[in-house]
Amino acid sequence: MPKGLRLRRRDATKQTDDEQMTNLTGGCLCGQVRYTITGEPIRSGICHCRSCQRYTGSAFEPFMIFPATSVNLRGELRSFGTVADSGNTVYRRFCPNCGSGVINQGDGASEMIIVLVGTLDDQTVFIPNVEIMCDTAWPWVHGGSERKRFRGMPV
């Protein structure tokens, strides 16, 4: 476990009240983009929207949202903007060398950074507590009752 990270788990699928996440690290596939995160996530979850499916090339996008001030990025990122269901632009930021998606940012929430969980050095710290855009989830993706599920984007 990374230095400074302390997690106590009674069950691998449930977060406990006394978890403390600090000094999370991650980056892109080639290593040219790296980040350090200090602090706890605002939310962690899974998005099933078609835009996230296409961007990740997968059935969904696992994410963790952090205050922008707690994320320290190193390296160059390129950006591609798409209009979300909310009408706001979501900027998908990726490494220009290897193409790995690293973070997302939105016009409507510039004070937050969405970290793509697959880029974390230690993905065991990710415990999703919400699923969004479930109306567009692939038919074989069945969430258990351990997370709150929303048909669309929660308000």
Image: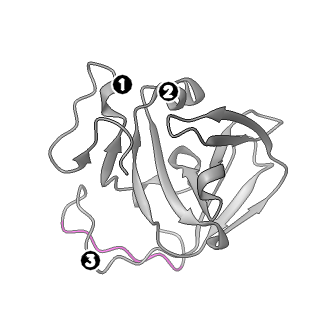
Q: Is residue 97 above or below residue 24?
A: above
Pick whichever, 12 or 111, lies toward us. 111
Reading the image, the residue beneath label 3 is 17
Reading the image, the residue beneath label 1 is 136
Residue 130 visible in this rendered orientation of the protein: yes
- Tell me: 92 left or right of 64: right
- Name the mark nearer the viewer: 3 or 1: 1
* Chain part drawn in magenta: 4-10
Reading the image, the residue beneath label 2 is 53
Residue at coordinates 31% horizontally, 33% vertically from top-left? 134
Let me know if residue 8 is in the magenta part: yes
Residue at coordinates 23% horizontally, 50% vertically from top-left? 147
> What amino acid is at disc 2?
Gln
Q: Which residue lies furthest to the left in this view?
A: 145
- Tell me: 81 left or right of 125: right
The spot of residue 58 in percent (x, y) is 48, 26
Q: In this view, does 137 lie above or below 6?
A: above
Look at the numbered discs 1 and 2 and tell me whether their residues touch, using CB distance below 8 Å.
Answer: yes
Q: Residues within 10 Å of mark 3 (few under 14, many from 20)?
A: few
The spot of residue 145 in percent (x, y) is 14, 45
Of helix, strand and loop, which mostly describes the magenta segment?
loop
Let me know if residue 86 is in the magenta part: no
Q: What element carries label 2?
A: helix
Residue at coordinates 52% horizontally, 80% vertically from top-left? 4
Q: Which of marks 1 and 2 is nearer the N terminus?
A: 2
The spot of residue 107 in percent (x, y) is 66, 50
Q: Earlier in the sequence, mark 2 or mark 3?
A: 3
- Name the mark nearer the viewer: 2 or 3: 2
